[in-house]
Amino acid sequence: MEKIKFGCAPIAWTNDDMPELGAENSFEQCISEMALAGYEGTEIGNKYPKDPETLKKFLEARNLEVASAWFSAYITTEDFNEVEEAFIAHRDFLHAMGAKVIVVSEQGYSIQGQIETALFENSPTLNGADWKRFITGLERLGDLANEKDMKIVYHHHMGTTVQTTTEIEQLMADTDPDKVSLLFDTGHLVCSGEDPMYILDKYFDRIGHVHFKDVRSDVKAQVTQNKDSFLSGVKQGIFTVPGDGMIDFQPIMNYLVEAGYEGWIVVEAEQDPSVCNAFEYATKAKKYIDGLGHN
Ligand SMILES: O=C1C[C@@H](O)[C@H](O)[C@@H](O)C1=O
Ligand SMILES: [Co+2]
């Protein structure tokens, strides 16, 4: 792995959590615009070809690599054999695409997809037995990733069982660093009211993947006050690209560079592309990031 590489997530073109957002944007438009905006890699969206050879053809023509892709785990609520089977298929696809890390998020009890559930009041907490089941299952997924010389990077996320600093600390304390790494997502930390520099400094050695997402403070206040859901918040524009919201990315980038981070930084800013054009915002984000200094 050579130092830092910059990728972009397709969620700004078409949102897989709400496919009506950006339904008009095609897969080819999405990857062509990412490449044109100056990115070297992409994560994977639902419109991407499922066959690795076909996908490689499209990406190689645009000089894009696959950084990773999200896996929704239901360790706490579903039969683990099924979780494992789905994970192996996902792992093998990413391995064939040359990715080194697998984004994992536990979605058992998650309120992330519930359009009517107030985001800032209903984040789930696991009881002791569920937490133990979660940790055991997650480490098993880590073993499966290691079989292919890959690692899982756990995505802390609004409205899920691992959202807050305390929950991240618990997860890090209870898992083997050789089996479970951390994904550092600036947008989710700040949206939740956490201090991203604290997490970055404390867990730098465990961070294997980075999502750069910014937060609009006025929309966050509105979503909190109106008791809106995560999805409703996204539609209203709670997230945006780095440099367009309340987060100061300079100290974050300085830390990553000075500490010698090697891996992907993926710009991931889900918002309504009919309001905030995905290409325009991806370009603006890349310019902002380049202005911070890196590599
Ligand atoms: O990494 C992510 C993937 C999305 O599906 C999710 O909802 C988004 O907020 C995110 O950070
Ligand atoms: Co993310």
Image (spheres, rainbow, N blue to C red):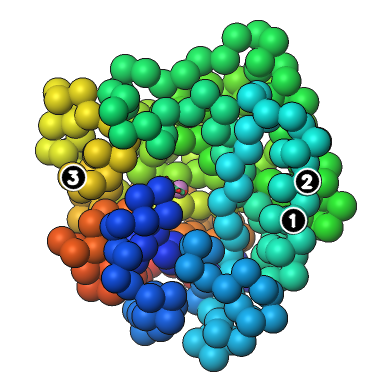
Q: Residue at x 75, y 39 (%)?
A: 82
Q: In the rendered image, is residue 67 in sight?
A: yes
Report the amino acid beneath label 1: Ala
Q: Residue lying farthest right?
A: 147
Q: Secondary structure at mark 2?
A: helix
Q: Residue at x 83, y 58 (%)?
A: 148
| Residue bearing mark 3 | 236
Q: For the residues marked 2 and 3, what is the alpha-carbon distance in whole angstroms?
A: 36 Å
Q: Is mark 2 within 8 Å of ligand 1?
A: no
Q: Secondary structure at mark 1?
A: helix
| Residue bearing mark 1 | 89
Question: Vertically, is 32 above or below 197?
Answer: below
| Residue bearing mark 2 | 85
Of residues 41 and 242, the one nearer the viewer is 41
Q: For the residues marked 1 and 2, what is the alpha-carbon distance in whole angstroms?
A: 6 Å
For residue 125, side relative to residue 81 (left or right): left
Query: How many C-alpha atoms fall within 10 Å of the one at disc 1: few (<14), some, or many (≥20)?
Result: few
Position in image of residue 19 (x %, y %): 36, 56
Position in image of residue 27 (x %, y %): 43, 75
Q: For the residues marked 3 and 1, what is the alpha-carbon distance in whole angstroms?
A: 34 Å
